[in-house]
Image (spheres, helix red, strand yellow):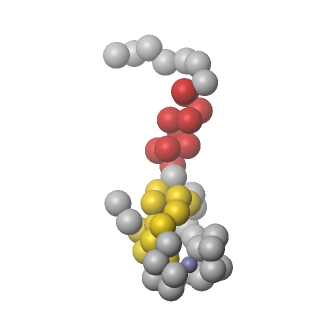
Amino acid sequence: MCSVGGPMDMELEERLNAKTYKCKDCQGTFKGIGKNIICPSCGSDSVIESV
Ligand SMILES: [Zn+2]
């Protein structure tokens, strides 16, 4: 299973880096990359990692 290449390659990399977070204020879930995640809906930084 070593067939890499094509447009799927970059998408996979983004998926690996992006984690799913849940906002404690508006209960919304979203994907984010990085350490300082802010909810895109309400702008709150009270988010928890949701696996
Ligand atoms: Zn929110």
Question: Quadrant location of the C terminus?
Answer: bottom left
Residue 44, x across and y down, in percent: 60, 82
Task: Tell me the residue at 51%/49% (across/down).
Answer: 17
Question: Quadrant location of the N terminus?
Answer: top left
Task: State whether residue 47 appears in this view.
Answer: no
Q: Is residue 47 above or below residue 13?
A: below
Task: Tell me the residue at 50%/35% (across/down).
Answer: 12
- Quadrant of the rendered structure where residue 10 is? top right
Task: State whether residue 16 appears in this view.
Answer: yes
Residue 26, x across and y down, in percent: 51, 81
Q: Nearer the viewer, residue 23 or 14?
A: 23
Looking at the rendered structure, the number of numbered marks drawn on it comes to: 0
Q: Quadrant of ligand 1?
A: bottom right
Task: Tell me the residue at 53%/58% (across/down).
Answer: 31
Q: Nearer the viewer, residue 36 or 38?
A: 38
Q: Is residue 49 above or below residue 25?
A: above
Task: Tell me the residue at 48%/67% (across/down).
Answer: 29
- Quadrant of the rendered structure where residue 20 is? bottom left
